Image (cartoon, helix red, strand yellow):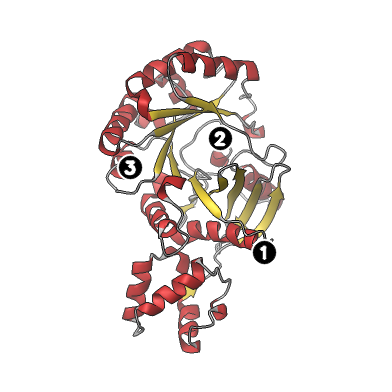
Amino acid sequence: MSKQSIYGMTLSELETWFLDNGEKKFRALQVWDWLYRKRVSAFEEMSNVSKPLIDKLSETFELTPLKQQVVQESADGTVKYLFELADKHMIETVLMRHPYGLSVCVTTQVGCSIGCTFCASGLLTKQRDLTAGEIVAQIMQVQHYLDERGKDERVSHVVVMGIGEPFDNYDNVMAFLHIINDAKGLAIGARHITVSTSGLVPQIRKFAENGLQVNLAISLHAPNNDVRSSIMKINRYYPIEKLMAAVDDYLQKTNRRITFEYIMLSHVNDRPEHAEELADLMRDKKKLVYINLIPYNPVGEHDHYQRSSKEDILAFYDVLKKNGINCVIRQEHGTDIDAACGQLRSKQMKLSGKK
């Protein structure tokens, strides 16, 4: 039976564990400091922790739940990691360099069952949810990678947009957010964290009540139900009317801006009339919404979809701007490596003969 990852525990949970196991409460903060400030790779490196306590921690917890299998480094500084979990499943994590800092995109599930027809992540259906510890460990693996290079670089931003639907693994994702946001640990600011969802309406409403100042992004990708249902089966359960009602409630309760992700698919959702529809959809909430236009990364298994031309993307952008909608064309990262989310994992699984 595999051990629990110590990265999956909040500081208060770790303090409770210490008290329940006959240890002083302050020892938990010492261990926490070793994990997230000094960033040790083994319990034995905790020099001010007694040998009996180190043995107890080692018997109970796992410190390195991920095994690095592949690292791809792009010319633009993007790094893509393929990690193996204890049960041999594979996940991807991406480090991206921005003018404002270093951002890590984390995976929340092994595979994905949302079934977006253009997405590499869904090529392998969901096998299981990741634990909070396995999600936190992705941040720690990347930070260790940076530490080993001696450049004094720090992960400053996190996007929960990797393989899987984060809100389909809601409790573990929320625990992850609290752990990386803790001021005594990694101290990644809530406003530097973004969680993406394909549109799970009940969880959007629940997220509005959680009190964290974490950013929300919604994968929209179409301005009407006909197009969205044809490319995202989630829309058949939560059509745009229900999704936008949840968005309105979220905006009213939080007064926080929402980003809408919009992948540009040639002659599918990128016509000027689609841009006009999208502008109409956002008109009554345009002060608190932001459209992120994303050039499509082609996926071999979905070769019926093609990237929109630069001219079509710019024309779409112009229509939104003329309608007063805040929007941006996303800067691309890692185009010279397996750029689309899930591609590296899919390729590796094929090479190994796994499904």
Which residue corresponds to the image point at 59% horizontal and 38% vertical from the top-left?
A: 120
Of tags 1 and 3, which is closer to the observer?
1
Residue designated by label 2: 119
x, y (%) of residue 250? Answer: 30, 36
**10 Å crowding of disc 3: few (<14), some (14-19), many (20+):** some
Earlier-in-chain disc, 2 versus 1: 2
Please tell me whether residue 309 is drawn above or below residue 351 in the rendered image. above
Residue at image location 64% in from the left, 60% down from the top: 145
Cα–Cα span, label 2 and label 3: 22 Å
Query: Which residue is rendered at x = 29% and y = 30% of the image?
Result: 248
The kind of secondary structure element at disc 2 is loop
Residue type of the residue flagged with mark 1: Glu
Q: Which residue is mark 1?
A: 148
User: Foreground mark, 2 or 1?
Assistant: 1
Residue that badge 3 annotates: 203
Residue type beneath disc 2: Cys
Q: For the residues marked 2 and 1, what is the alpha-carbon distance in whole angstroms?
A: 33 Å
Q: Which mark is residue 107?
A: none
Rate crowding at label 2 as few (under 14), some (14 to 19) or many (20 or more) other CA atoms within 10 Å: many
Relative to 149, 219 lies left or right: left
Q: CB atoms at circles 1 and 3 under 8 Å apart?
A: no
The answer to which of 188 and 305 lies nearer the viewer is 188
Give the camera-side residue of 140 and 273. 140
Of circles 2 and 3, the one toward us is: 3
